[in-house]
Image (cartoon, rainbow, N blue to C red):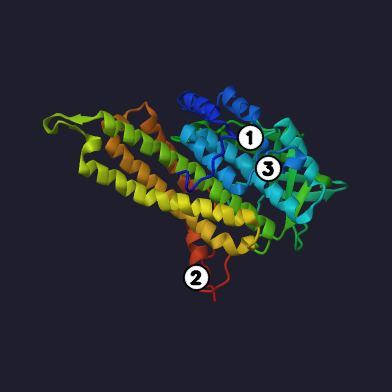
Amino acid sequence: MEAIWPNTDHLVPEKVVQELAGLAEENDRNGRLSDRSIEALRECGYYGLPVPREFGGAGASLVECCAVQRRIGAADPGLSVAVNMHLFSMGFMVEHWLRHRDDSSALLETIAKEGQIVVSAFAEPGLGGSLTRSNCTARREGDNWVTNGIKVPCSLAERSDLLCLQMIDEAGGPESLLVALIPTKTDGVRVERTWNTLGMRASESDTIRLTDCPVPDDLVIHRGAPGSTADDVFAAGTGWFCVTATACYLGVAAAAVDQARAALSRARINHLDATRAELPSFQSALGEIMTALLPMDAACAGLARKLGEHEADSRSLLPAMLALKLQAATQAIRAVELTTELVGVGSYSAKGTASRLLRDVHAARYHPPTSFVTRQLLGRWALGLPWNFDLNEHPVR
């Protein structure tokens, strides 16, 4: 993959990735991350990965961030998805700063230098997969906003230092969608442990309840129009999520391929006096898997580079990035399922890496925008019709 992905050992050393891989089984079994998984990433500066060097970050490009996520995804899928929510929030903040050059640089600097964790509190029930709406209400009281609502799932909620959340100004207006960054220990913020799933068990994607939570107006870092695709910052932030989340699941698939490769090299068919790896039928089966995965890696890296170069309007890249995310989820799931056949009955065990990867990869189906929103959006885009992130079951002309 050296021709597709940049080397990122200088950002997250390989010894750190190997340490994370050694903790993955225990994390999955416990349904929570070990403290060491979190600290190993903090020690190498991961939480400031995309923050410009002038603010104490690593200054990693978007394609480098994706390459890191792919490596962590292969090592510990639950961890990769959990910290990817932090990375998404950081990407959103960086994209905002690049366009506005405002005081949000101070927040970026604090996060990078202190290794703080930011939880992405964007997901909510009842949104239908939309990323540019919120059911959390906010009313203005003096210098504060007071917000109420529920955010779920929110990866690393209990471990986070800051919440990046969106809310709706109940007074309405053209820029009533507000994005703010507040301390997790703010009054009115309560984290509930609700995450108990088949796969990605260690992502700690719990529930956050906001009850009369005060949000200082100077911590509102971005304002936009609900449901709109015209906001370049939201478009770029969505792009960050599409390519980094895709990279995580491509890492899961890459780990499954490694499991299959090792199993084929070990397993002998006695009457043929050969390992399965030496037989054309098994070689072709593995080739089928790679035929699906290699284009996904190339597309993910290519779109990440394109978005990161800031030469194209991020809104013009949205259809391709959303299509990538949807297609990569389909291909990654199918690839991991096919690798289990090559691994053999051991992949059906209740324990072991192969069965864990099979459980983990299916989480790719559930990240917003949902497949229902994405398919509808892409169909309307292809027909030259108005499109956005909102499900709409009425005729569109």
Query: Is 9 in front, or is 374?
Result: 9
Point out residue 331 in the picture as x, y percentages from the top left corner.
40, 50
**Mark 2 residue element:** helix
Q: Secondary structure at mark 3?
A: loop
Tell me residue 313's x, y (percent): 64, 63
Numbered mark located on residue 46 in the image: 1
Q: Residue at x 47, y 52 (%)?
A: 298
Taking depth in this image into account, of 104 and 298 the one nearest to the observer is: 298
Earlier residue among tags 1 and 3: 1
Give the Cα separation between the discs numbered 3 and 2. Answer: 36 Å
Q: Which residue is mark 2?
A: 382
Looking at the rendered image, the disc whose residue lies closer to the viewer, 3 or 2, is 3
Q: Amino acid at mark 2?
A: Ala
Q: Residue furthest bottom?
A: 397
Q: Which quadrant does the N terminus fall into?
A: top left
Q: Earlier in the sequence, mark 3 or mark 2?
A: 3
State the SS at label 1: helix
Amino acid at circle 3 = Gly
Q: Which residue is mark 3?
A: 59
Disc 3 to disc 2: CB gap under 8 Å: no
- Residue 229, percent from left and from top: 64, 63
Residue at (54%, 55%) from the top-left corner? 303
* Circle 2 residues within 10 Å: few <14, some 14–19, many ≥20: few
Q: Residue most toward the right?
A: 142
| Residue at (26, 43) in percent of width and height | 283
- As shown in the figure, which amino acid type bears the numbered disc 1? Tyr
Indicate which disc residue 81 carries: none
> Which residue is nearer to you in this view: 308 or 89?
308
Instruction: Give the label, 2 or 1, closer to the camera.
Output: 1
